[in-house]
Image (spheres, grey):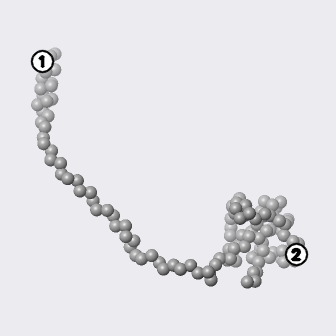
C-alpha cells in the first residue's frame, strides 16, 4: 500500500514539470471612438412656434359625475389619454373641476367636442 502511494506521488510530481512562463505585457485595446459621426443639428428655439394646449371641462351629463372631467387639446387635435392620466395632469397643474357655465357654445360642443377658438 505504501509502495503504491509512493509510486503515485512520484508519478504525480515527476509528470508535472514547471515551465517558466514569460508574461507578455498586456496592452489594452484602444478606446472606442466617442466622437459623434456628424455635427449636432443647429437648433434655435423659436417663441413664434409654440404649441397651443387647451384643458377644457366637459359639461355635466357627459362628465359622468366627474369621472371624465376634462378634454385635452394640443394644436387643435384631441389628446387621447386615460382618465387617470388626465386627472394626474390636472392635479399636477392644480386645475380644479368646475361645471362649465350653461351656454349655447358649450351645448354645441365647443371646448369638449372640438377645441375653443382663441383670439390672440
Gap in angstroms between the C-alphas marked 1 and 2: 112 Å
Q: Is residue 68 left or right of residue 1?
A: right
**In the image, is residue 116 above or below residue 61?**
below
**In the image, is residue 13 above or below residue 24?**
above
Residue at position x 23%, y 56% in the image? 27
- Residue 105 visible to the viewer: yes
- Residue 82 visible to the viewer: no
Q: Which residue is mark 1?
A: 3
Looking at the rendered image, the quarter that the N terminus falls into is top left
Kindly identify which numbered label has been placed on residue 39. Answer: none
Identify the image quadrant of residue 63: bottom right
Image coordinates for residue 34, horizontal then vertical, percent: 37, 67
Q: Toward the viewer: 64 or 29? A: 29
**In the image, is residue 18 above or below residue 39?**
above
Image coordinates for residue 117, horizontal then vertical, percent: 76, 81
Earlier along the polypeptide chain: callout 1 or callout 2? 1
Image coordinates for residue 11, horizontal then vertical, percent: 12, 28
Find numbered disc 1 in the image and state the secondary structure of the residue it sits on.
Answer: helix
Q: Is residue 96 left or right of residue 74?
A: right
Q: Which residue is mark 2?
A: 103
Looking at the rendered image, the quarter that the C terminus falls into is bottom right
Residue at position x 83%, y 60% in the image? 65
Find numbered disc 2 in the image and state the secondary structure of the residue it sits on.
Answer: loop
Residue at position x 87%, y 77% in the image? 104
Residue at position x 39%, y 71% in the image? 36
Structural crowding at the residue carrying mark 1, measured as other residues with C-alpha within 10 Å and reported as few (<14), some (14–19) or many (≥20): few
Identify the image quadrant of residue 62: bottom right
Q: Toward the viewer: 36 or 45? A: 45
Structural crowding at the residue carrying mark 2, measured as other residues with C-alpha within 10 Å and reported as few (<14), some (14–19) or many (≥20): few
Name the residue at the top extreme.
Answer: 1
Image coordinates for residue 99, horizontal then vertical, percent: 84, 66
Amino acid at each position: 500500500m505504501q509502495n503504491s502511494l509512493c509510486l503515485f506521488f512520484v508519478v504525480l510530481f515527476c509528470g508535472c514539470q514547471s515551465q517558466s512562463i514569460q508574461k507578455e505585457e498586456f496592452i489594452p485595446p484602444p478606446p472606442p471612438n466617442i466622437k459623434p459621426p456628424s455635427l449636432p443639428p443647429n437648433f434655435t428655439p423659436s417663441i413664434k412656434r409654440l404649441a397651443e394646449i387647451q384643458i377644457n371641462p366637459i359639461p355635466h351629463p357627459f362628465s359622468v359625475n366627474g369621472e371624465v372631467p376634462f378634454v385635452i387639446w394640443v394644436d387643435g387635435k384631441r389628446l387621447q389619454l386615460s382618465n387617470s392620466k388626465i386627472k394626474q395632469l390636472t392635479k399636477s397643474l392644480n386645475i380644479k373641476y368646475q361645471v362649465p357655465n350653461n351656454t349655447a357654445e358649450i351645448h354645441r360642443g365647443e371646448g369638449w367636442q372640438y377645441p375653443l377658438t382663441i383670439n390672440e
